[in-house]
Image (cartoon, rainbow, N blue to C red):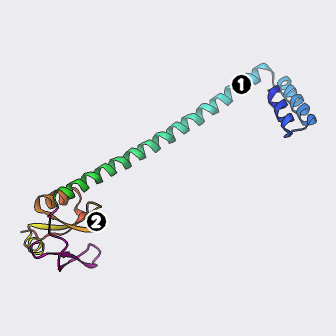
């Protein structure tokens, strides 16, 4: 501890007088409390330190669990993106026609499709889903198998599907 006082004094953070006062206060405190009191103070400080460390570990554990949950959600989303990519109806978009459909909030929008894509969506052999980054646009056309899987796994992604 004397080294710390000397270092603080040399750095100009405390004066010589303050360093002497600190040393004197420490000596008085030791004399007042005695060996048993010093041991009790040390035990109390150690207990506080352990409590702080336990709280920090619990906080870190909760943070790790949260990160793991987010990673699981992302991996689930990645699986959905892979599923959407695997079920894309090639050549259905873009096209000269606009296929209008209603979003869950009631807003009406459209997807530019070709004749074949429009017929497949209208007949129910294809569906319009949110692309979730699988393709460049916000919506895409997928086959029936993919639409069925998505309706089970993430029904909010299936936007337009004329089922039988």
Mark 2 secondary-structure assignment? loop
Label located before the other in sequence (2 or 1): 1
For the residue carrying disc 2, how many other residues have a C-alpha within 10 Å: few (<14), some (14-19), or many (20+)? few
Q: Residue 40 carries which label?
A: 1
Mark 1 secondary-structure assignment? helix
| Image quarter of the C terminus | bottom left
Q: Which of 113 and 71 is in front in this view?
A: 113
Q: Distance between the residues labelled 2 and 1?
A: 68 Å
Q: Mark 2 points at which residue?
A: 136
Q: Is residue 39 left or right of residue 111?
A: right
Residue drawn at (8%, 67%) of the image: 125
x, y (%) of residue 116? 9, 73
Task: Give, as a single range, the part of the protein colored magenta.
Answer: 88-116
Looking at the rendering, which quadrant does residue 114 occupy? bottom left
For the residue carrying disc 1, how many other residues have a C-alpha within 10 Å: few (<14), some (14-19), or many (20+)? few
Looking at the rendering, which quadrant does residue 107 occupy? bottom left
Q: Which mark is residue 124?
A: none
Q: Do the residues labelled 2 and 1 touch (CB within 8 Å)?
A: no
x, y (%) of residue 154? 24, 59
x, y (%) of residue 1? 79, 26
Q: Is residue 5 left or right of residue 74?
A: right
Residue drawn at (63%, 32%) of the image: 49
Looking at the rendering, which quadrant does residue 136 occupy? bottom left
x, y (%) of residue 59? 51, 42
Q: In this view, does 12 lie to the left or right of 156?
A: right
Q: Residue placed farthest to the right in the image?
A: 17
On whether residue 96 falls in the magenta region, the answer is: yes
């Amino acid at each position: 501890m004397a080294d710390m006082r000397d270092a603080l004094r040399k750095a100009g953070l405390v004066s010589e007088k303050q360093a002497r006062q600190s040393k004197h206060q420490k000596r008085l405190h030791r004399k007042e409390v005695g060996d048993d009191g010093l041991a009790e103070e040390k035990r109390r400080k150690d207990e506080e330190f352990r409590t702080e460390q336990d709280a920090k570990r619990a906080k870190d554990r909760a943070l790790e669990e949260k990160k793991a949950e987010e990673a699981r959600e992302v991996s689930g989303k990645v699986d959905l993106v892979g599923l959407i990519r695997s079920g894309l109806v090639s050549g259905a978009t873009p096209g000269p026609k606009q296929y209008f459909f209603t979003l869950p909030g009631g807003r009406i929008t459209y997807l530019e499709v070709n004749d074949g894509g429009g017929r497949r969506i209208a007949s129910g052999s294809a569906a319009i889903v949110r692309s979730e980054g699988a393709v460049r646009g916000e919506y895409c056309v997928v086959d029936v198998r993919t639409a069925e899987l998505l309706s089970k796994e993430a029904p909010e992604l299936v936007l337009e599907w004329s089922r039988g």
